[in-house]
Amino acid sequence: MTRVPLSVLDLATVREGHTSADALRGTLEVAKSADELGYHRFWVAEHHNMPAVASTAPPVLIAAVAARTNRIKVGSGGVMLPNHMPFVVAEQFAILEALHPGRIDLGLGRAPGTAQATAAALRGVSPYLTVEQFPEHLQTLLALLGDDRIENATAGRLRATPAAESFPEVWMLGSSTYGAQIAAALGLPFCYAYHFAISSDVESALRLYRTGFKPSPRFPEPHAMVSASVIAAETSEEALYLAGPSRIMALSLRTGRLGPIISPEQAAAVELSDLDRAMLDSLPGTQYAGTADEVVADLDALVERTGADELMLAGTVYDPATRQDSLARIAKAWGL
């Protein structure tokens, strides 16, 4: 059976009792495993001022991952463009592409990826860094990265790098129909963040993307990737136990009680109020937790339902070794 490519999304999660350096070293180990196991891409996210996430600067982390892997494509899932001037992002990713030609992805998001006060600290008082200007900034960035279709005054005056041989692959990310429509209009590949938007209508977003897609030189056809949160273990019971920290983290995000990710033992022992219990029961945390065969069956069904051309596997776990084991089990069952 021929299956779609699988990729990996990582947040460099910080465990209770551990440091940011520990989290980043864990990400590098997971990336090396993903490279060896045959995964297609390894993306890192952008989040700020969160006790459980050390992935704050994707270009820096991408450079470290790409230098320690051999063939896997490495990128951002994603750079939150309202936090950055397009020229800065273009320069950063032009360098990454020059160092690792053909291996760099630039996934872009419209959300700030952080709270309002932190977003203000990132952007300063610039009137040019707003969500409303996202379409303009996206087109400026594309022009700076070699998209000749777009006439842009800024790109006409500036070069992201003096003499490019190639450019990173630009992706639009989203968890709504907005991102899907932007990707379609500009002929970009699109990644739907289903791992944190389980209650949303992924089918409608991808339908809009495909029906509205306008071919571009790099992508004559639409190309859709869907993310999902997964954990595979020896037994279903063990997988659900290992998924415990992700559920507590999902609850903490929604209740503002942020902290490092706790262990499965701690997650199992957490005493919850009736309100917290009701909220926890409505949160996915990890969408697909089970044996490798069970997870693969769920992923096959997701591909069948969405028509995804690729899948990206997220998964919040306490120990990077757990993530490596989970990815190895899924890779074998998927046939990578």
Image (cartoon, rainbow, N blue to C red):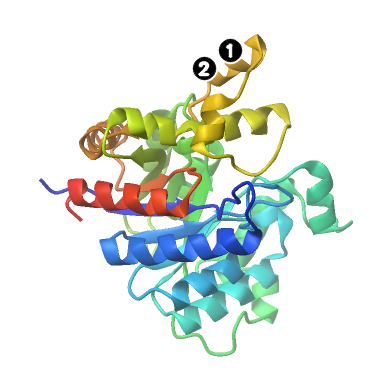
Say which quarter of the image contains residue 273: top right
Question: For this rendering, which residue is in front, 139 or 67?
Answer: 67
Q: Amino acid at mark 2?
A: Asp
The label number, if any, that marks residue 249 in the structure image:
none
Which type of secondary structure does the marked residue at label 2 adopt?
helix
Quarter the N terminus occupies: top left
| Other-residue count near label 1 (Cα within 10 Å), few / some / many at <14 / 14–19 / ≥20 | few
The answer to whether the residues at label 2 and label 1 have Cβ atoms under 8 Å apart is yes
Mark 2 and mark 1: Cα distance apart in space: 5 Å
* Residue 72 in the figure: left or right of residue 285: left
| Residue 2 placement (x, y as % from top left) | 13, 49
Question: For this rendering, which residue is in front, 24 or 128?
Answer: 24
Please give the name of the residue rendered at 48% of the width and 49% of the height, measured from the top-left corner.
319
| Other-residue count near label 2 (Cα within 10 Å), few / some / many at <14 / 14–19 / ≥20 | few
Instruction: From this view, report whether residue 208 is shown above or below residue 326.
Output: above
Give the residue number, with chain letter if any, for mark 2: 281
Give the residue number, with chain letter if any, for mark 1: 278
| Residue 299 placement (x, y as % from top left) | 28, 37
Instruction: From this view, report whether residue 64 is shown above or below residue 33.
Output: below
Residue pushed farthest left? 1
Quarter the C terminus occupies: bottom left
